[in-house]
Image (cartoon, grey):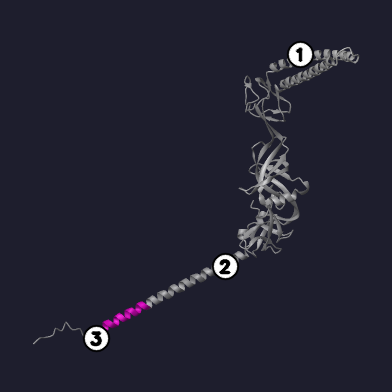
C-alpha cells in the first residue's frame, strides 16, 4: 500500500488564512494611498488659498499705497509748427577764376583761404606784350588820323573847285571815297586800341565776387592760356549762403498753402545733432519736381552768414517754420502714454487719485505735445512714475522742477504734425 506524505498536503485553514492576509494588505495600502492623495490635495488648496490671500493683501496694499509721481500743468499757449529735414550747405556763388589771355604768371597776389572783395587783384599776368600792342595801335591811329585830316582838307578844296566847274566831278567823288576809307581805318585803329587795353586789363585777373579763395591751382612762372580747362583758383561767396534740404512730399500741400501770396517762411539751420543753432534764413525756392525715388521735395533757403557758421558742403538739420498754432493746449510729451486703445494720460484729481484720460495728440515738439482733446488747461498730468500706478491709485504729486515743462520751445525742438513719421 502506498502511504500519503503528511507534509505535502496543507491544511485547508492555512490557505484561507494566507488569502485573508493578502486582502487585508491591499486594503491597507489603498487606504494609505487615499490618505496621501487627500493630504496632497488639501495641502495644494491650502497653499493656493494662502497665495490668493497674500495676493489680495498685496493688491490691497498696492491700492492703498500712496505712490510718489511728478506732475505738470496742462497749459494753453501759442505753439510754432516746424517741419524738419536734413540738408547741406552750398555757396551762394562759386566761381572758378580763369585767364582770358595767354601769358606768363608774374605774381599771385592772394593767400589761400583769404577773404577777397569784388575787384581785388588775384593774379598778374606779364602785361608787356599787351602794352606793346596798345602802343602800336595808338601809333597807327595817330598816323591814320593825320591822313584823314589831310584828306578832308583836300575834299573841301575839291568841293569848291567842283562847284566852280574847274575840276571833274569824278575827282571830287574819288576824294570823298578816300576820306571815308581813312575814317573807317581810324575807327578800326580805335577798336584795336580798345582790344589792347582790354587785354591789358585782362592781364590783371580780379575777383568777380566777394568771397573766400580756395587752394591755389597754378603757381607763378607758369604760362597759362585762355583755352586751359582748369582755373587759377576757386572763389566762393559765403555771405549770404544757401542751404538745400528735403522734406517728405506729403508736406508739400502745407508748404504751398503757407507760401501762398508770396509769404516768406523762416528756416533755421542746426548742427547735425540738432544741439547748436547755426543761423536763420528764409525759404527761397521750392523745387519744381518731386524725387520719385525718395518721395521727397527739395527746398532752398538763403541765410545771412557774417560769422561763417555755415560752410559749403556742411551737413545740417534744417527746420522750416510752417505756422503758429494759436492758443494750443500743451502738455509735456512724457505725459503721453500709448495703450491698446490709443493714446492716454494719467490725470491727478483733487483727491490725489490718478485717472486715465484718452487724449488726441495733434502735434509733437521734442518734449512737448499739442493736444486736440482729452485734457483741458489747469489739469495736472503725470510725467514720471506712470509705470507704478493704476487707474484710481492714490498718488503724492510733485510739480516738475526746472521751469514750465509745458512751455513750447522749452526743448528747442520743432513742432511736428502728429503722424508725420518724424
User: Which one is nearer the viewer's eye here, 117 or 62?
Assistant: 117
What is the spatial separation of the Cα atoms under label 3 and label 1, in whole angstroms? 167 Å
Quarter of the picture containing the N terminus is bottom left
Q: Horizontal and vertical percent for residue 374?
A: 70, 61
Task: Say above or below: 117 vs 5.
Answer: above
Q: What range is drawn magenta here? A: 16-30
Which quarter of the picture shows residue 391? bottom right
In this view of the protein, which residue sits in the foreground, 1 or 255?
255
Q: Main secondary structure of the magenta part?
A: helix
Front-most of residues 420 and 356 = 420
For the point 66% across and 53% down, the residue is: 420
Q: Is residue 261 magenta?
A: no
Please identify, in this view, whether the residue under mark 2 or under mark 1 is nearer the observer.
Answer: 1
Residue 57's label in the rendered image is 2
Residue 24 image position (x, y, % from top left):
32, 81
Q: Is residue 224 left or right of residue 266?
A: left
Q: Which of these two is toward me, 194 or 393?
A: 194
Label pair 3/1, CB-CB below 8 angstroms: no
Kindly check if marks 3 and 2 are in contact, taking CB atoms under 8 A apart as contact. Answer: no
- The residue at the point 43 percent across, 75 percent down is 38
Res. 341 visible in picture: yes
Secondary structure under the numbered disc 1 in the rendered image: helix
Tag 3 residue: 13
- Residue corresponding to mark 1: 139
Mark 2 or mark 1: whose residue is earlier in sequence = 2
Amino acid at each position: 500500500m502506498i502511504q500519503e506524505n503528511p507534509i505535502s498536503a496543507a491544511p485547508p485553514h492555512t490557505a484561507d488564512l494566507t488569502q485573508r492576509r493578502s486582502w487585508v494588505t491591499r486594503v491597507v495600502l489603498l487606504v494609505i494611498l487615499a490618505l496621501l492623495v487627500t493630504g496632497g490635495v488639501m495641502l495644494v488648496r491650502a497653499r493656493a488659498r494662502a497665495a490668493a490671500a497674500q495676493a489680495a493683501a498685496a493688491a490691497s496694499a498696492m491700492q492703498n499705497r500712496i505712490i510718489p509721481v511728478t506732475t505738470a500743468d496742462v497749459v494753453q499757449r501759442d505753439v510754432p509748427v516746424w517741419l524738419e529735414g536734413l540738408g547741406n550747405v552750398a555757396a551762394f556763388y562759386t566761381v572758378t577764376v580763369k585767364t582770358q589771355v595767354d601769358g606768363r604768371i608774374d605774381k599771385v597776389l592772394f593767400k589761400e583761404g583769404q577773404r577777397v572783395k569784388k575787384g581785388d587783384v588775384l593774379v598778374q599776368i606779364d602785361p608787356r606784350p599787351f602794352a606793346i600792342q596798345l602802343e602800336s595801335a595808338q601809333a597807327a591811329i595817330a598816323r591814320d588820323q593825320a591822313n584823314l585830316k589831310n584828306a578832308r582838307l583836300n575834299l573841301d578844296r575839291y568841293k569848291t573847285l567842283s562847284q566852280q566847274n574847274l575840276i571833274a566831278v569824278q575827282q571830287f567823288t574819288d576824294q570823298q571815297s578816300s576820306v571815308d576809307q581813312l575814317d573807317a581805318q581810324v575807327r578800326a585803329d580805335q577798336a584795336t586800341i580798345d582790344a589792347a587795353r582790354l587785354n591789358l586789363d585782362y592781364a590783371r585777373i580780379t575777383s568777380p565776387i566777394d568771397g573766400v579763395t580756395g587752394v591755389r591751382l597754378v603757381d607763378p612762372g607758369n604760362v597759362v592760356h585762355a583755352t586751359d580747362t582748369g582755373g587759377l583758383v576757386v572763389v566762393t561767396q559765403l555771405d549770404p549762403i544757401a542751404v538745400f534740404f528735403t522734406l517728405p512730399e506729403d508736406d508739400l500741400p502745407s508748404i504751398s498753402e503757407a507760401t501762398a501770396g508770396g509769404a516768406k517762411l523762416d528756416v533755421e539751420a542746426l548742427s547735425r545733432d540738432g544741439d547748436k543753432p547755426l543761423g536763420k534764413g528764409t525759404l527761397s525756392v521750392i523745387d519744381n519736381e518731386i524725387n520719385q525715388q525718395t518721395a521727397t521735395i527739395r527746398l532752398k533757403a538763403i541765410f545771412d552768414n557774417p560769422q561763417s557758421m555755415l560752410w559749403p558742403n556742411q551737413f545740417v538739420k534744417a527746420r522750416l517754420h510752417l505756422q503758429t498754432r494759436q492758443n494750443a493746449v500743451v502738455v509735456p510729451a512724457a505725459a503721453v502714454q500709448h495703450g491698446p486703445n490709443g493714446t492716454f494720460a494719467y490725470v491727478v484729481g483733487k483727491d490725489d487719485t490718478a485717472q486715465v484720460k484718452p487724449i488726441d495728440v495733434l502735434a509733437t515738439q521734442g518734449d512737448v505735445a499739442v493736444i486736440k482733446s482729452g485734457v483741458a488747461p489747469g489739469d495736472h498730468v503725470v510725467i514720471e512714475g506712470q509705470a507704478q500706478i493704476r487707474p484710481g491709485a492714490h498718488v503724492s504729486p510733485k510739480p516738475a522742477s526746472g521751469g514750465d515743462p509745458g512751455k513750447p520751445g522749452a526743448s528747442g525742438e520743432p513742432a511736428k504734425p502728429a503722424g508725420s513719421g518724424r
